[in-house]
Image: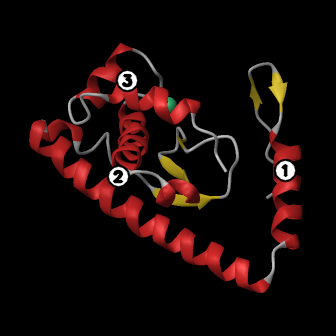
Amino acid sequence: MLGRIFFRNGKIGIIRRVRRRVRRVRRQSAASKLEYAAQCEAARALVTERLAHFAAEYARLDPALVEPMTYRRIAIRNQRSRWGSCSSKKNLNFNYRIVKLSPELRDYIVVHELCHLKELHHGRAFWDLMKRTIPNAGDLHHQARTMRIS
Ligand SMILES: [Zn+2]
């Protein structure tokens, strides 16, 4: 859908970004479309497996986390601006380029969004939850933020 607009950091941005993506997809050759589809499929398999792994880990640490850390669905997207996101409706989005990252960074991104299911902010409770399975989350956060998405 092109119609979704949200207001963030004082700017309305989503419509322009979506249109640019549509143009980019149209320019792709049949071969690169296939490659993109394969990467999306690989990203979905990877993210699903790592989410299950870490959800089990959190459940082992605290069974009360099972319910709040349950997601509704996963979407794999082609985005230039972010590696992942989590909506208040408990839907998770991941950038298909996650497959190109190191296993450590992939896990950081997966656990970051998994923890947002419970804590939908970047406050102390969020970081404490993340660091229960990723003790160096702070360093990895910095790495992921300073990396160009391309
Ligand atoms: Zn976040």
Which of discs 2 and 1 lies nearer the camera? The answer is 2
Q: Nearer the viewer, residue 44 or 15?
A: 44
Residue at mark 2:
103
Q: Residue at x 46, y 52 (%)?
A: 101
Residue 138's disc number: 3
User: Is 29 positioned to the left or the right of 101 in the image?
Assistant: right
Which mark is first along the chain, 1 or 2? 1
Q: Residue 128: x, y in percent?
A: 27, 21
User: Is 69 positioned to the left or the right of 72 in the image?
Assistant: left
Q: Residue 54: x, y in percent?
A: 25, 48
Which mark is first along the chain, 2 or 3? 2
Q: Residue at x 63, y 78 (%)?
A: 35
Q: Nearer the viewer, residue 44 or 63?
A: 44
Residue at mark 1:
3
What secondary structure is found at the residue carrying circle 1? loop
- Structural distance between the alpha carbons of marks 3 and 1: 35 Å
Question: Mark 2 belongs to which amino acid?
Answer: Pro
Check contact, mark 2 vs mark 1: CB within 8 A: no
Question: Mark 1 belongs to which amino acid?
Answer: Gly
Which of discs 3 and 1 lies nearer the camera? The answer is 3
User: Is 54 positioned to the left or the right of 13 in the image?
Assistant: left
- Structural distance between the alpha carbons of marks 2 and 1: 35 Å
Task: Identify whether 45 is placed above or below 71.
Answer: below
